[in-house]
């Protein structure tokens, strides 16, 4: 028996989730298109804003477009390939992971790959257009973009997994986890220059918008090895925290201490 | 009028009995909202976070004072109070469109028709109750935040006027979402109507920025819309407010409430006719 | 213990519940100083299961059946005690054990509702590292044995509950486990579907020499699928004996309810006992060792005026109570 690698296995699971999201074609088209319209509208508002005020603490329209492009593409790819993150707390609270525990695989990977959202394609599509047309990027920026973007994706999913893992301890964690993840997106959709003091502290810790989008943007606008190191370290630290909290929680679950419905 | 048995139930004059049952529904909605206190608390936290981000944005814009930009058109005291009021109203409106969609899609609306009280009035009244509780809780959070921030308070008359114009503005929002919810009679899903409404609120309601900053034609369009009566008029009280302006805003709100109630009733009847024909 | 597949010794599991206080203040107070209640879900059980045995663990709701199954399949850690499955400690060697066992939860699906079962089977094959000609052949055999061919192309959510359960069981057999755990496999199914699932499990187990452990609160599941029954109640083993014996002593009863609006029904046959009598309704308990059900019905129908008849097994709670009473005599 040859063991399938984690990556191959994950790809298989995620592909099934994507196929399932395609199953209802009308719904798929409706959802992804309405997300495009939704995002397009937000972009128009920012155009109007910068037409009127030109700059926010040194951030120009192109910087804002870069930021929005990064966060939208992160949310898009996360929703397509790691869609299970969005309602992971519910999966934990309903005891759905019992079946996953009887399989010879990482429970976390199985949870992340079990869902995929049509609207996420709309996010990804808009994001690509925004990044290509308005963010003022050149070919030479691509390696930096790849590094920053990947790190942002890891931090974003890690934060969401950490919030969802609270469900192992708190029965009301479903809406809490969803709200916290929404907050990360909210903080990630405003110019980084506006944060200072306490709000900056929060943006670089509890709601890590700082590491999801702001350091990647800085990496692209002022490339330096120092920023690159920060970006990589942030991804590793947040991923480690998420993995640690999830596994502590899973241990607790397997002791039977998690408040699951209908034990 | 053609003979329509179920519609005659709807057409029964409600009198005091109808008012009493509507008031009971308001209470029910308020009690329900209070029972879900973690949700109320969560919304207050969301409000605070939103305020931190949005005030930081506008403060930064104002601090930069770029010549030749719209900064000159912004009020001297900044936009914190304006934003505070728009978000206070906006976050207090319950998602009645989802309730209506559920009832219409599941067919539950038909069982409600058997009761002697008007379904729509009862549902709106229930949401009104929840809305009042939300206004109180989020309002308290807003005042606490204002006190902590050390910003200048609005003049007392404006604050007093807000106690009336805020809830009325929220009521207009509730009616707008009610109309979005009634679209479920025709399109099953209210998401499209909701998204369109949300965009209109952002732009014409002044949630994005005071509508007076827009090009003149857009400003005029916004000011004449119910969306401005929902958020912009109450929020602009904090910026500059003469007694006459307050009276005008109040009048605009009352007119819109009357018009939207009428419109909701018309759409409801059309939807009901569809149910009675059996082609839902 | 040469041929024992499962060995369980003094296994215990207790849950700690924070009992909640009402209201906002209560909830805040509860977060700081919760009142805990201890519940012994499994309270010191021991047994062995040999290779090829088909064993039912039965008991009323909350008796500890599912908890036991979860500990044996590696999902839950016990509070104390020991268990070995294929010589492995399930909760410590979860992944190694996973390749050798199949698990079906009657109330949870491991299939994608939107996709045909075929797609879920392919994914599970990859999860269990199954591939190549041997696997293809196995899949073909299973599809044939369970008559799934006409269902394979349809999204699972369009299948009936019984068809879906057949696919669920097939999914758990793809990696050829030699031990199958089934948690309430017939829950919610109608009588025909239940019968099909029972045949399905029995036939497959016989053919492959598979060990089967199932939990249920439906007495019929046990009778038809299993040769041995372990009855648990309140976390303890009440009875552990061959199904034949148990059937002869405790599962030989039926409840017959007759609706006769116009009269009180009398049945004077040996082995028939009146359980309840209300206006329009009479309930009889029938000892099937002494009299056949059809005989009772025929006698009842003779008097006329009967509008409806229901025949049921006594509820599990009652059977367990009876066993309990006998065991403690």
Image (cartoon, coloured by chain):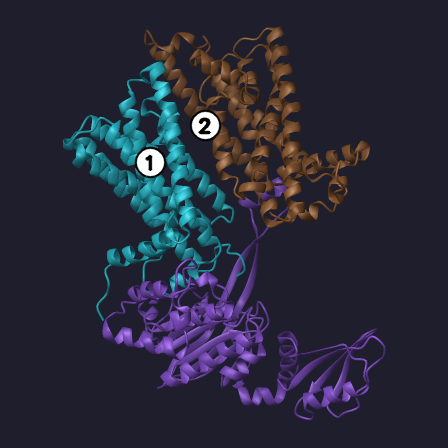
Q: Position of residue C8 (x, y in %)?
A: 43, 76
Q: In the image, B134: left or right of B148?
A: right
Q: In the image, A55: left or right of C231?
A: left
- Check if mark 1 and mark 2 are on a common chain: no
Relative depth, front residue between A69 and A126: A126
Q: In the image, C252: left or right of B68?
A: right
Q: Quarter of the image holding residue B157? A: top right
- At horizontal 45% and vertical 11% (from top left) the residue drawn is B216
Q: Position of residue B52 (x, y in %)?
A: 44, 24
| Disc ID at residue B50 | 2
Question: What's the colour of chain C in the image?
Answer: purple
Q: For the image shown, how many numbered marks are present on the structure?
A: 2
Mark 1 near mark 2, Cβ–Cβ under 8 Å?
Answer: no
Tag 1 residue: A72
- At horizontal 85% and vertical 79% (from top left) the residue drawn is C263
Q: Is residue C7 above or below residue A157?
A: below
Neighbour tally class for label 2: few under 14, some 14-19, many 20 plus, Cα within 10 Å: some
Relative depth, front residue between A250 and C99: C99
SS of the residue at dot 2? helix
- Seen from this angle, which residue lies furthest front? B2
Kindly tell me whether residue C12 is visible in this rendering: no
Kindly tell me whether residue C231 is visible in this rendering: yes
In the figure, the cyan chain has which letter? A
- The quadrant of the rendering that contains the C terminus of chain C is bottom right
Question: What's the colour of chain B in the image?
Answer: brown
């Amino acid at each position: 028996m040859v063991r399938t690698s984690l990556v191959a296995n994950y790809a298989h699971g995620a592909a099934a989730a994507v196929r399932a999201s395609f199953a209802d074609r009308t719904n798929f088209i409706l959802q992804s298109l309405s997300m495009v319209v939704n995002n397009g509208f937000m972009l128009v508002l920012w155009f109007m804003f910068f037409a009127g005020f030109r700059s926010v603490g040194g951030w120009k329209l192109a910087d804002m477009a870069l930021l929005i492009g990064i966060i939208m593409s992160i949310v898009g790819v996360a929703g397509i390939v790691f869609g299970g993150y969005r309602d992971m707390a519910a999966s934990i609270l309903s005891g759905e992971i019992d079946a996953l525990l009887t399989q010879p695989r990482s429970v976390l990977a199985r949870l992340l790959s079990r869902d995929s959202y049509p609207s996420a394609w709309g996010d990804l599509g808009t994001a690509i257009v925004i990044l290509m047309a308005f963010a003022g990027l050149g070919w030479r920026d691509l390696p930096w973009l790849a590094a920053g973007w990947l790190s942002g994706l890891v931090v974003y999913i890690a934060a969401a997994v950490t919030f969802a893992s609270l469900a192992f301890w708190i029965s009301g964690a479903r809406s809490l986890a969803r709200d916290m993840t929404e907050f990360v997106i909210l903080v990630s959709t405003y110019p980084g220059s506006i944060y200072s003091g306490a709000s900056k502290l929060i943006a670089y810790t509890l709601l890590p918008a700082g590491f999801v989008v702001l350091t990647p943007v800085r990496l692209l606008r002022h490339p330096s090895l120092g920023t690159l190191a920060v970006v990589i370290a942030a991804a590793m630290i947040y991923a480690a925290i998420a993995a640690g909290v999830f596994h502590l929680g899973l241990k607790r679950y397997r002791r039977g201490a998690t408040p699951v419905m209908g034990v | 009028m053609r003979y329509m048995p179920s519609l005659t139930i709807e057409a029964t004059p409600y009198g005091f009995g109808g008012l009493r049952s509507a008031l009971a529904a308001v209470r029910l909605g308020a009690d329900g909202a209070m029972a879900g206190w973690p949700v109320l608390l969560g919304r207050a936290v969301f409000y605070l976070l939103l305020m931190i981000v949005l005030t930081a944005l506008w403060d930064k814009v104002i601090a930069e004072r770029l010549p030749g930009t719209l900064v000159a058109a912004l009020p001297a005291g900044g936009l914190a109070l304006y934003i505070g009021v728009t978000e206070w109203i906006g976050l207090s409106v319950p998602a009645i469109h989802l309730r209506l969609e559920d009832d219409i899609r599941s067919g539950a609306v038909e069982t409600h028709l058997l009761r002697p009280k008007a379904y729509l009035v009862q549902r709106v009244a229930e949401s009104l109750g929840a809305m009042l509780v939300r206004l109180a809780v989020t309002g308290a959070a807003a005042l606490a935040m204002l006190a902590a921030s050390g910003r200048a308070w609005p003049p007392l008359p404006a604050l007093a006027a807000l106690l009336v114009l805020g809830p009325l503005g929220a009521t207009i929002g509730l009616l707008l979402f009610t109309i979005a919810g009634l679209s479920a009679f025709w399109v099953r899903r209210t998401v499209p109507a909701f998204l369109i409404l949300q965009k209109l609120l952002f732009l014409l309601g002044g949630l994005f920025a005071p509508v007076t900053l827009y090009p003149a034609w857009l400003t005029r369009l916004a000011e004449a819309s119910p969306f401005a009566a929902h958020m912009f008029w109450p929020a602009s009280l904090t910026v500059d407010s003469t007694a006459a302006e307050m009276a005008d805003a109040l009048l605009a709100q009352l007119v819109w409430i009357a018009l939207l109630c009428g419109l909701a009733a018309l759409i409801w009847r059309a939807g009901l006719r569809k149910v009675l024909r059996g082609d839902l | 213990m040469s041929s024992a597949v499962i060995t369980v010794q003094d296994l215990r599991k207790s849950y700690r519940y924070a009992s909640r206080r009402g209201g906002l203040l209560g909830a805040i107070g509860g977060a700081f100083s919760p009142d805990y209640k201890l519940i012994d879900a499994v309270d010191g059980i021991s047994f062995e299961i040999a290779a090829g045995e088909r064993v039912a663990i039965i008991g009323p709701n909350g008796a500890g059946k599912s908890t036991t199954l979860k500990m044996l399949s590696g999902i839950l850690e016990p509070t104390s005690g020991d268990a070995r499955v294929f010589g492995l400690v399930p909760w410590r060697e979860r992944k190694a054990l996973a390749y050798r066992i199949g698990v079906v939860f009657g109330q949870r699906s491991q299939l994608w509702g939107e996709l045909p079962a075929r797609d879920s089977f392919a994914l599970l094959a990859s999860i269990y590292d199954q591939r190549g000609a041997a696997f293809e052949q196995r899949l073909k055999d299973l599809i044939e044995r369970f008559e799934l061919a006409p269902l394979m192309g349809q999204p699972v959510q369009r299948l009936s509950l019984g068809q879906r359960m057949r696919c669920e069981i097939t999914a758990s057999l793809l990696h050829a486990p030699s031990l199958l755990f089934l948690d309430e496999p017939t829950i919610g199914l109608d009588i025909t579907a239940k019968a099909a699932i029972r045949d399905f499990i029995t036939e497959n187990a016989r053919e492959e020499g598979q060990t089967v452990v199932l939990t249920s609160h439906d007495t019929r599941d046990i009778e038809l699928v299993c040769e041995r029954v372990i009855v648990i109640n309140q976390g303890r083993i009440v009875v552990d004996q061959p199904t034949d014996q148990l059937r002869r002593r405790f599962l030989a009863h039926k409840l017959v309810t007759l609706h006769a609006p116009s009269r009180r029904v009398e049945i004077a046959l040996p082995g028939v006992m009146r359980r309840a009598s209300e206006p329009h309704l009479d309930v009889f308990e029938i000892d099937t060792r002494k009299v056949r059900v059809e005989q009772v019905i025929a006698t009842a129908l003779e008097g006329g005026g009967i509008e409806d008849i229901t025949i049921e097994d006594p509820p599990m709670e009652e059977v367990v109570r009876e066993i309990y009473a006998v065991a403690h005599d």
